[in-house]
Each structure stands twice: as C-alpha cells, then as structure tokens.
Amino acid sequence: MQPTYSFIVPVFNEEATLPELYRRLSVVMDSMDGAVELVLVDDGSSDRSLAMMRELHDRDHRVCYLSFARNFGHQIAVTAGLNFVRGQAIVVLDADLQDPPELILDLADEWRRGYEVVYAQRVQRHREGWFKRLTAYVFYRLLRQLADVDIPTDTGDFCLMDRRVVDALNAMPERNRYIRGLRSWLGFRQIAIPFERDARFAGEVKYTFRKSLSLAIDGLVSFSKVPLRISTYVGLFAAVMAIVMAALVLYWRFFSPVSPLTGYATIAVAIFFLGAVQLFSIGILGEYIGRIYEEVKNRPVYILREVNGFEPVAARQGVPTSWNASARP
C-alpha cells in the first residue's frame, strides 16, 4: 500500500533509544488517518543499532531502513531518507526523543489545513546547559539577520513537508546541505508549531560543540554572502588605518623625532594587525572555496551498504548503492 505519511529518523549509535522510539512512534502511526512508513537511516553506527533496525523491520512491515557504508553525517542521513520516502506528507525527527513523536499529530493537522511545511519551533529546552542555550539563541538570531532568506529562529529539522516540497529538495544539487535553510529557501506555505524540547532519552549527545559549530558555519556560508562583505570591509578599514599610520609616521619622523610612538613597537603592532586581517579574510574566503571544491568533485553524497523495505522502488528502478546530488534514485 502506498503510504500517506513517511517518518524519517536518522540513527547513529542509538541502541539505547530505539526501543522507546519505536514504541512511541507505533502509537502515533496507529493514530494517523492513513498508511505510514517509518524510514530509519543508519548513519554508520558502530553499536547494535543496525541489527535492531533489522529486527524492527522483520516485526513490522511499516519499518524500512537504509544503512550507510560509513558515517556521512546527520544532514546527509536526512537527505537519504528524503530520496527514498514514498509518502505524501514527510516527517523528519531525531532518534534521541528530544523531538516528541506525539507532536506529529499536530503537524499533520496543519498539513491537512493546506500548509505545505509545518515546522516545530522550540520555546524551551529542558536540561541543556546555559552555554548551549546561549549559543543557540545567538546563532539563530544572527543567521536570520545575515541570511538571504528568512530562516525561522529556534527551529531544527523536526518538521512535516508536503510531497512537492520534498521533490523540490531532492532536485537541489548542492552537497553541503543545511536542510532547515533549504526548506525556508523553497518557500511554499509554512507555519510553526511551538513545543518544548525534551532532554535526551538515553545515551550520549551526538551533536557535540564541534559538530554544532560546523553545522552553524555551513548554514551561514550556504545562505549568506555577508562574511565575504565583512572581510572586504575589514580590508578597507585596514587600508585606511595603514594610510593614517603612514601619515603619522612621516609626521613623527620629520616633526617629532623623539616621539615614543615610533620605533619597533609601532612596527610590530602594525605587522600583527595586518597579518590578522589577512588571515581572517583568507579564512572566510577558504570556507567558500572549500564548498566550491566539494561541489565540483561531483562525488556521491552517500554510499549505501544495505537497503530493506523499499521493494516497490527496487523493483521499478533497482536498489541504488549511491546517490549523486544531481539525480534522484
């Protein structure tokens, strides 16, 4: 049966949360007004997550799964799920149960009212440190100010998208994918559902500070040219400062030879300042060049090791082992 709803759940070393996740999702799936498929995407887990996904598939025909050949990252796992889903309304949520599965019913209600993107917006974060809350608060508001599109604050990947939105996402060729930004860039009718983000149910936090920072940089570079403009402005400021300093040095040299501001200290400060400006500008430029480099290599976005539960797709087109961003399987 062609499903009406598809649930995508990226999984990376979540053996402690999978049983409870499936239990709560089963209740939600039974409550939906149409057929549901649950798509679990194993992002190269090293624990029993994949084995448990196989067991869930054997017990419940609604459970499908994909398994990567290695860890490709959360955003790519979401992308793989979007490539394979068959439903008309597609829900993306995390496996750690910080995104409450029960909220899917509210997301589906808004979809039936005609909204094509229904995203969950956090109004409170339970059991998260002050540093995490502060950096998230600052980042989302900074990104909204700098981005070329209006990306809602305090939103993650937890959302429901209409089939047309998912087809448009799948047609986008870029590899450094910031899903929540791409979702906003597409437009369509969108609405927010407020919710309180729960604490992780079990296991270790997968999004470390380093990964969160990397995702933040991806979002900023992918949807804003402001960092490049900032480097230009800083360069112009340094040039003006250099002219002013040159004029001052000449003045001190001819009219105030005993000035304490001349000599080695002034030269050292000027060198360090200009060096910092150059490195800062090169770093920003490098971020953009790095993304160009990733795009032109044209490698597959991910490699699949195992696929199960997508028999209609396999029978029609063959099970893909990799996916290129320029072509949907």
Image (cartoon, rainbow, N blue to C red):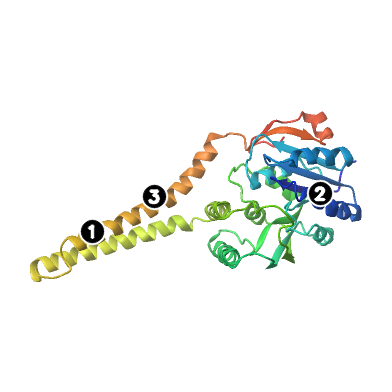
Q: Position of residue 216 (x, y in %)?
A: 56, 55
Q: Position of residue 81 (x, y in %)?
A: 73, 43
| Mark toward the start of the polypeptide (3 vs 2) | 2
Frontmost residue, 252 versus 202: 202
Callout 3 amino acid? Ile
Category of crowding for the residue at label 2, using alpha-carbon neighbours closer than 10 angstroms: few (below 14), some (14–19), many (at least 20): some
Residue 282 numbered mark, or none: 3
Q: Position of residue 192 (x, y in %)?
A: 73, 64
For label 2, the residue is 19
Q: Are marks 3 and 2 in contact (CB under 8 Å)?
A: no
Q: Closer to the observer: label 3 or label 2?
A: 2
| Residue 208 higher or lower than 260, as above or below | above
Quadrant of the snapshot with the C terminus? top right
* Distance Cα–Cα, label 1 vs label 3: 21 Å
| Mark toward the start of the polypeptide (1 vs 2) | 2
Residue 253 numbered mark, or none: none
* Distance Cα–Cα, label 3 vs label 2: 48 Å
Question: Of helix, strand and loop, which one carries label 3?
Answer: helix
Q: Which quadrant would residue 60 be assigned to in this image?
A: top right
Q: Residue at x 78, y 59 (%)?
A: 100
* Distance Cα–Cα, label 1 vs label 2: 62 Å
Q: Residue at x 89, y 40 (%)?
A: 59
Category of crowding for the residue at label 3, using alpha-carbon neighbours closer than 10 angstroms: few (below 14), some (14–19), many (at least 20): few
Q: Are marks 1 and 2 in contact (CB under 8 Å)?
A: no
Callout 1 amino acid? Ala
Q: Are marks 1 and 3 in contact (CB under 8 Å)?
A: no
Q: Residue at x 34, y 56 (%)?
A: 276
For label 1, the residue is 268
Frontmost residue, 90 versus 70: 70
Q: Which quadrant would residue 102 be assigned to in this image?
A: bottom right
Callout 2 amino acid? Pro
